[in-house]
Image (cartoon, helix red, strand yellow):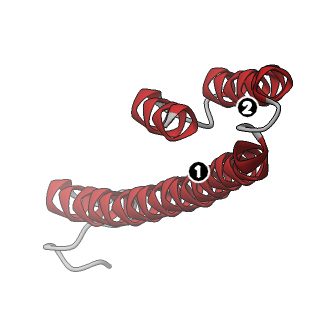
Amino acid sequence: MAPLGRRFGRPGLLGLAARTAVVAGTATAVSGGMQRRQQARAQSQYEQQQYEAQQQQAAMQQAADQAVAQAQAQAAPTAPAAPAPSAPAAPTAGVDLVAELQKLAALKEAGALDEAEFAAAKARLLA
């Protein structure tokens, strides 16, 4: 015969509550760990995208600076020759200037330059 204080079969109310608490605690811990891992992964991806965007912006800025420097270098040799044949040299320099301004405008439209960078590059060309 079984002792009087023990029951066999289904657990009692206290055993059921304890089991439920353990399952709920484990589920909460696992869920929290998964959520932290997902947040860390998302943060890592965001930082990688930001880094790539900064690198791309730096490359575009360098290309824009090189274009401006090249335009200035092309304009510099024609400037000393300008006093002798003044009429023919002015349209040639104007065409180069217009072409360079169009390049800068294209870079701005493509998103490579913001408004301040475009204005600075344009001012360097026109100076």
- CA separation in Å, label 2 and label 1: 20 Å
Rendered position, 41 above or below 114: below
73 sits left or right of 52 in the view? right
- Picture residue at 76% right of the left edge, 30% below the top: 93
- Picture residue at 22% right of the left edge, 58% below the top: 12
Q: Earlier in the sequence, mark 2 or mark 1?
A: 1
Q: Which mark is residue 26?
A: none
Residue at numbered disc 1:
57
Q: Secondary structure at mark 2?
A: helix
Quadrant housing the N terminus: bottom left
Q: Position of residue 97 (x, y in %)?
A: 71, 28
Mark count: 2
Q: Nearer the viewer, residue 20 or 94?
A: 94
Q: Residues within 10 Å of mark 1 (few under 14, many from 20)?
A: some
- Picture residue at 67% right of the left edge, 54% below the top: 69
Amino acid type of disc 2? Glu
Q: Nearer the viewer, residue 23 or 7?
A: 23
Q: Secondary structure at mark 1?
A: helix
Please identify the residue farthest to the front as the structure is shown: 84
Residue at numbered disc 2:
100
Task: Answer with the quarter of the image where residue 31 lies.
Answer: bottom left
Which of discs 2 and 1 lies nearer the camera? The answer is 2
Rendered position, 7 above or below 114: below
